Amino acid sequence: MKTTRNIVAAVVTVLAFSTVICEGVSTPPRRIPEGALTPEFSAVDTTGKPFACTRSSGKVLILAFLSSEQKRSQEAVEDIFRALSSIPSDRLTSLQVAFVMQDVDNRQFIASIQKEAPTVVHILDDDRHRIWGKFGIIATPTVLIADPQGKVLCVKPGHAYDFAPVVKSRLFQALEIPYDVSPSDTSTVRTVANSTMSAKAKRHLQMAKSLSKKGRVISAIEQAKMAYEIDPNSSDVALELAELLCRAGQAQKAIKLVSAASVQNHRDKARTNLTLGWANRQLGRLQEAETFLKEGIRQDATLHRLYFELGRVYQQRDESEKAMQAYFRALQLIYQEEEQ
């Protein structure tokens, strides 16, 4: 038994250098889809005025989820204000506008919003993520626009090249104001800016991977976040950032990322289950962890980290033989990768 424990400990030590570690929480709801009805809620803004999101209000709703410390959120505010300024003044009364934040202590940012706003803007302090959770929002900035019946027309995460035209076209659609560009065209048009932004996101992602290999995890996270802000719909970017966040112990953020990511192929689905299994193991939910990890192996049996985490589940259960088999398979896959 002592020999078995020593072997297991040695394998764990070897694999620790090639993998990442995270803690996690249960899976949050996914982002509200376009076409859904907005959840109803009430709140009090930072000036003490009430704000109610109700589907019976008959008003177009704009919710912007922002960070007062983030440059792209500030740029998003400017684009939103430009869109609002292009709306006839008599139609502005048909709008409900709220900015939802957890960091409302940045007085300079708040003051600039109140000074520049072309219409009434409620600033909602949501430090407990109550409103964020209702809508399944995780990225900043994210803008949601709903029509007077409460139907979601647009959920736009990140501040990419098409942010401003999408927001403006959806606002005009909701208010039934003629606009020279179709809302469906603004989000799918391919331009030079698109390819430039995509290339920029890929450069940040490659830099993140390079820094990660050198053990510079915090710097890697910064680069991956830049890539995510540019292209929040990329599953590769989201999964890479989630794994980096796991390495830094920022498990809650990592779990939210993978839970909201739109994954298609088996490899990405396996990586998602890896993160979920990993997190549940660290929370002591060993049965759930085993289920996620085995599902990940079914989706992609070449991902060595799945076997390593499964081995750790068995080790925590004192099932030494199963743990050894899982660790051994993980090592085999690592050696195969190195030989290729």
Image (cartoon, rainbow, N blue to C red):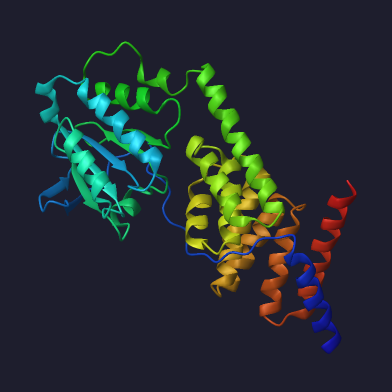
Q: Where is residue 283 in the image (x, y as percent from the top left)?
A: 53, 72
Can residue 182 be seen in this snapshot?
A: yes
Q: Farthest residue in the top direction?
A: 180
Q: Give the residue at x 81% y 73%.
A: 324
Q: In the rendered image of this protein, does residue 128 appear above or below residue 227?
A: below
Q: Farthest residue in the bottom direction?
A: 2
Q: Farthest residue in the right direction?
A: 339
| Residue 60 sits in quarter | top left
Q: Where is residue 151 in the image (x, y as percent from the top left)?
A: 27, 35
Is residue 84 rendered to the left or right of residue 194?
left
Between 100 and 293, which is closer to the camera in this rendering?
Answer: 100
Q: Where is residue 79 in the image (x, y as percent from the top left)?
A: 32, 29
Can residue 35 be seen in this snapshot?
A: no
| Residue 290 sits in quarter | bottom right
| Number of marks in picture | 0
Q: Give the residue at x 78% y 78%.
A: 9
Is residue 128 rendered to the left or right of residue 287?
left
Quadrant (top left/top right/bottom left/bottom right) for the N terminus: bottom right
Q: Give the residue at x 67% y 44%.
A: 266
Q: In the rendered image of this protein, does residue 136 appear above or below residue 306?
A: above
Q: Position of residue 304 (x, y in %)?
A: 76, 57
Between 117 and 128, which is closer to the camera in this rendering?
Answer: 117
